[in-house]
Image (cartoon, rainbow, N blue to C red):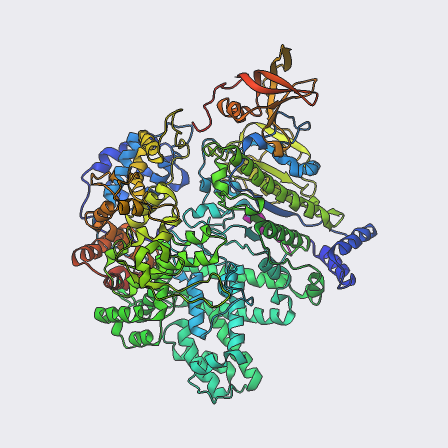
Amino acid sequence: MSRNWKIERRTFLRGAGALLPLPFLNLMEANARSGDLYVSDPPLRFMTLFKPNGVHPPSWNVNGGKENDFRMSPLMQPFAKHKDDLLILDNMGDFGFSSHSNSTRRFLCGHHQNSRSASVDQLIADQIQGDAPHRSLELTTEGLFVNQIGCSYISYDKKGGMMPRDSDPQLIFDKLFRNPLSDPGKRAEMASLLDRVSSDAKALQRKTGVEDGDTLDEYFTALRETELKLEKMGPLDQGLESSKFARLARPLAPSNMDEQVNAMLDVISMALWTDSTRCISYMLGNSNSRMIFDFLGIKKQHHYLSHFFRNFSRENIDSLLKISLWHMEKFDYLLNKLKSYKDHNGRLLDHCVVLYGSGMGHSDNHTAQRIPVVLAGQGGGKLKTGRYLRYSKNQELGRLHLSLLDLFGVKQESFANAKQPLPGLGGGKFDEFVERPYESWVKVDSGVMTVQGRLRMSDNLDEAKVFYIDVEGRNSVRMEIGFGDFHSRNVAYHVGTPIKLTGKTVEKDGLTILNKITGLESLFGNSTPGKAGG
Amino acid sequence: MRSIFCIFFFPAFLLGGVFEDQVVPILERSCLKCHGGDKTKGKVDFSEILTEVDAGDHLDLWETVLEVVELGEMPPEDEKLLSSEEKKKIRGWHEEFIKLPVEIAIPVFRPRRLSANEYKNTLRSLFGFDLEVGIARAEQTESGEKSLVLKILPPDPPGKSGYFNDTYSTPLSSSLLENYTYLAGVSLDRLFSKKGKESLSRMIGQNGDWDGKITPSLAEEIVRSFLPRILRRTVPDERIKAVLDPLKGKQGKELVSVLMFELKTFLISPEFLYRGFLAKPSGKKGRQAVDPFELAERLSYFLWEDMPDDELFQSARNGDLQDKAEVGRQVARMLAEPRARNLSESFGVQLLGLSSIDDQIKNNPIHLHAMRTQPRDFLHYLFTEDRPVMELLDSNVTFVNQSTSGFYGNDRRRLAPFHKPRGIERQRTMNQRLEIKDAEGRGGILTMPSILSMNHGPILRGTWMLRTILGVRLGEPPGDVPAIKPPPRGKKMTFRERFEAHRENVTCARCHEKIDPLGFALDGYDKNGRYLLASYHKRGNQPSIDTSGKLPSGEEFKDFEGLKHILITKKRDQVIRNLTSQLLSYALCRKLGRGDQSVVEAISRKATLGNLTWKDLLIEVANSVPFRETLFSQSEAK
């Protein structure tokens, strides 16, 4: 599809001189585009970013909100500035509870029992590789969890086997941009080597003895793929490869995890921009990640903290929110990168679909509902972004995957349990969640305030102890309560839902602040849903 | 997917209708709607499984059934879930069923890719040098991966058996093939460079005077010595000739480059990267002994995680390995070689899950080194010095260095002094072998500080002991497991008391009645492995820590010593059976099936009654039917 596009870009890059730093190169290309260099469509890319350990729903969920009128949740603040490029999906998932390994499989396979087919990224990779030398990259941050191996993989091959993952940004960089095979001589040698090995292996195949078609087939497939890769790095690139990639900066050896992830996201963006690959999956951690975020000053393991209800303490919640914010910041970092690269007649992000999310909703009780899923990028105009889609009924992830397959041109009748694609992604109709109507109001009577409205956490997670109750037509009521109230009234449980609340107030900096709860009633739900720790 | 087990066993024993009376009705009631007859969702069809004999044909299926039923994944959410009574019936039948003796059944032979470690070791043995990454690091900094091979190859997940050498389910990808090609290139480049001269001259028997020039006759020499070692067996003349032909008439640089090319084709061939493509069937039908080179390879990868050495090749060539006594002799010899270290580094580490020590100690390389090496050195000692199997749990020998000596009371005075160079404050030190005489509460793997600190707290310790030592698999806790309740207001409860309350819930009790007594017995040790009770005993005080307990099978004990005594007496056969089956699974690089049970039974009975040593046990495994024999697909019984 894009040979032309490639020649144009590569010729241009060669002309740009070998020593220009990247941003400048970028700038030049942006200027050059007015010359209408491009005759074909840019390739579409697919990128997945996996967040471990579900979410803390009170701070993640969007409270209320309609398709085009919604307020991003406190946890979404780090990437709120990209709102116009996002499609936030809500009410995604299965029923019931989910183990960590099931939720890992669910993320890209649509359903945890879909374990004999390829994950959606791999199906897409096959379809869109085009001229890109590397079919796909499977990347991760954390090592293998040997005891729960299912938690360490999101990408699966067509037999449902685990795709090996790479985790060293420097190695990936070298593989993509300092590959010995970019040298034509080396490539020729490799080609004849593969030729020989292939004919020898065929002889082996004909021989009697061990008859294991499957295993040998696997070897032949790998051989063929490597030959294909050589062709794609092929004659077009002679002399260009080195000049094209020489300018890309090799990441330094990271000294902590934050640097490692940033380096990897840098390499990912470069890989997509240079069209070295069009499909990448990246895990920010295993799905039951036990990483210790010491660079955030946190000494406890993420998985332990993610069970925020069982292992409740104010300090643990704060730590969990810090970690969650860090995950959101990484998504923001990636989006910034993808926007910073000019691609064709626009930004790289315009020609990408980024799938960000997890395979699990509530990180403590492991519900498989309201799984966090955000799409970013316009997918070449096929996604209508800037919207919040909250479906009236629970939607299995498989439906989303079926839509993505369609978007990337993979013709498939069904995926996992899904027979129908997910409606609404391109701007079409969908069955939107409608909340039961309720009235919101405030009454104050001699220091006792009664307020009815939707409870939410403060947008600023640095003050995670502060809650607001939204009341139509006036400022939200600020609530600063002590630990006793928070704990015994199970305030976190009610976040996002309408409540009627009675309490004592105090004046602070000219504001009336509710600081002691004397009564809490859920309008539509259970008023005493059980206590923290119970 | 084709089951790898060729089923041709004749169940000599059946449970007399338990399956038909208790399990089949449940299947009919709750499963058949979607998994039987017209509909066979997930290709599962229970309508064809009516008797226990049928059930035996689908061994893998039952494990899946138990798992999904246990997790509440099946029946699906819109159907009625199984009652705990029903679950118990299926589980109970399965537990008994898999214990039934059956005839030995051997799976059809399948080639298997070398694991990353096997590949690394094999490459080193072939070339005589290690490939290391080009960055030197100080001892005190956290050490990254030193081996170039392990740095470049993505880690393989453990297979169904739980062991890394079980690579059946991880595919070879094109990027992996590219990595293999790169590593083969780097190795050959180095071999034919100045740096590799020593290795090369060793390979072709040249002495120090050799000028390093590759003459045509030396090139032939290299081919003849290298090829059989790459393919790990004698190579037919025509194959050697096919490699020698392109070398004809070449000289100097050209000769070397053609030679390197030819060798490279072998180093990325399936015959090298996989084990078993060249295994030769005997021609007769049914189960048959593997050919001598295959057996040699099985032995060396089992004991060394590496290719056979010259002596083992020699023994294979002579046909000596057919003799079980010769296999015994070879095992004994191989255990005395330095490469036997890999048995504890690989099997031992995976058996006991020791890699989690690495994940837990992040910022203190010296402490990490001490904690890592202690159990490994101990296992190496047990495996190679002919120690009784049960010394794993009960031994008066341990391995101690400067960092761990503090755990061993007055015994540490008998250690040779550790010397520190001037200006060095802390350093890594080698472990010394130490006989435990005075130190209280030590001896055996369970009370080793590194094991105790690897598993903090009674629950992790209990679970670990149950799984690793007793071989009991618990499965995942149910998804909606309630939290451990805090004590009611105003009441003080110990951790132990809170778990006693937790066990009042029947669902929780199922696992916790097994876990808790084992774990709480170790409460006399703190999270760093320090023995808290020593000081009480010294002062003659009654300890305030309750370490007593009662196992579900009825045995009571008053402290950990009591539990240990039960483990090495009443539970002795269970422990040995577990260790045997782990060892066999590792040796065969696959998950054991029902057809292996009688082998496990026979070996463990022998080990229990005869007080066998680890060396004996290794020899028994090496001489067992599934290790020595195989089944080729074309000889498959119909």
* Residue found at the far right of this picture: A35
- Residue at the location (29% across, 46% down)? B57
Q: Is residue A304 visible?
A: yes
Q: Nearer the viewer, residue B624 or A237?
A: B624
- Residue at the location (70% across, 18% down)? A474
Instruction: Give the left or right position of residue B392, taking residue A263 as reference.
Output: left
- Residue at the location (36% across, 52% down)? B449
Q: Position of residue B534 (x, y in %)?
A: 30, 48
Q: Position of residue B301 (x, y in %)?
A: 36, 65
Q: Which residues are magenta?
A: A122-131
Q: Decide: is A406 above or below B121.
A: above
Instruction: Tell me if residue B449 is in the magenta stretch.
Output: no
* Residue found at the far top of this picture: A445
Q: Mainly helix, strand or loop, the magenta region? A: helix
Q: Position of residue A251 (x, y in %)?
A: 64, 57
- Residue at the location (32% across, 49% down)? B468
Q: Quadrant of residue B289?
A: bottom left
Which quarter of the image is occupied by the C terminus of chain B? bottom left
Q: Decide: is B281 above or below A499.
A: below
Q: Position of residue A466 (x, y in %)?
A: 60, 27
Q: Decide: is A177 above or below A337.
A: below
Q: Nearer the viewer, residue A243 or B389?
A: B389
